[in-house]
Image (spheres, helix red, strand yellow):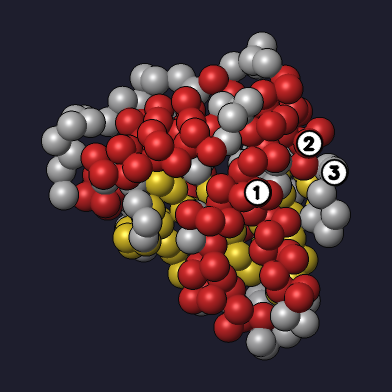
Amino acid sequence: MPTLLLGPRRPDLVERMDDPDCDRARLDATYRHFTTLNRLIAGWGTIYARWIRPRLAEGPASLVDIGCGGADVAWLLARRARREGYSLSVTGVDPDPRAIEYARRREGVEVLACDSSELAATGRTFDFVVSNHVLHHLSDAQRAGLLADSERLARRAAIHNDIRRDDIGYAAFSVFGMAFPGSFIREDGLRSLRRAYTVAELGAVLPAGWRVRRLEPFRLLAVHETGRGDD
């Protein structure tokens, strides 16, 4: 559905937490609040149940979170697998040293200071490649690079989870975002929603072998399933 109030994508908008000189206390609060925010509305429980848990039932598996930020998603997935008695080795990667410093406070997650191309160049592979709120940040060239790197890195599936540009979602988050004071979550979240794709827009720019899926509330996924197994 086209957005009537938000209009076309605004990839020119800059989020406050991307400013290297932003307030560090507010940035740390943003990383901290992401744990709650993403657990509540990012849909990782559905993704885990649909793609990840079936593989875990076969034996030990591995996952990498690209652009992991404070590693909250990586930590949540590692914790859920561990609580269910599965073996999931989780790695988070991010080129931002501020994110890496925060992410290394997490237990049970390997954290690497690099981007997807640097990781792919090492020859490492993982059962799953995931990201959260990354796609809308990228230029066309960066997006193409991330998807190509994901195909090299993923043995089973790559799942890039992002917000969906939606008028109702924008209105809802303008209120919901006030639950996270002292952080950049509301301000940056509203900018992210204006930078984000609709399902049709993302589907139009994905390369062959990728598909776009809706996920509620107000999410979309770029998914590539490889079927490479443990080779």
Q: What number is the disc on residue 105?
A: 3
Label 2 vs label 3: CA separation? 6 Å
Q: Which residue is mark 2?
A: 102
Residue positioned most to the top: 21
> Judging from the image, what secondary structure is the residue with disc 1 in?
helix
Residue for point 54% across, 32% down: 185
Percent coordinates x, y for residue 8 in the rendering: 21, 30
Q: 197 or 37, which lies in front? A: 37
> Judging from the image, what secondary structure is the residue with disc 2 in?
helix
Look at the image and tell me whether residue 66 can be seen. no
Left/right of residue 43 with respect to residue 199 in the rendered view: right
Q: What number is the disc on residue 35?
A: 1
Which residue type carries mark 2?
A: Tyr
Task: Please name which of the two marks, 1 or 2, marks the residue nearer to the observer.
Answer: 1
55 lies above or below 47: below
Residue for point 67% across, 37% down: 31
80 lies above or below 145: below
Residue 90 appears in which quarter of the rendering? bottom right
Which residue type carries mark 3?
A: Arg
Label 1 vs label 3: CA separation? 13 Å
Percent coordinates x, y for residue 17 in the rendering: 59, 24
Q: Quadrant of the C terminus?
A: bottom right
Q: What number is the disc on residue 177?
A: none
Percent coordinates x, y for residue 89 in the rendering: 77, 66
Q: Are marks 2 and 3 in contact (CB under 8 Å)?
A: yes
Residue for point 27% across, 31% down: 9
For the residue carrying disc 2, how many other residues have a C-alpha within 10 Å: few (<14), some (14-19), or many (20+)? some
Count of number-bearing discs: 3
Label 1 vs label 2: CA separation? 12 Å
Residue 104 appears in which quarter of the rendering? top right
Left/right of residue 46 with respect to residue 86 in the rendered view: left
N-term-proximal mark, 1 vs 3: 1
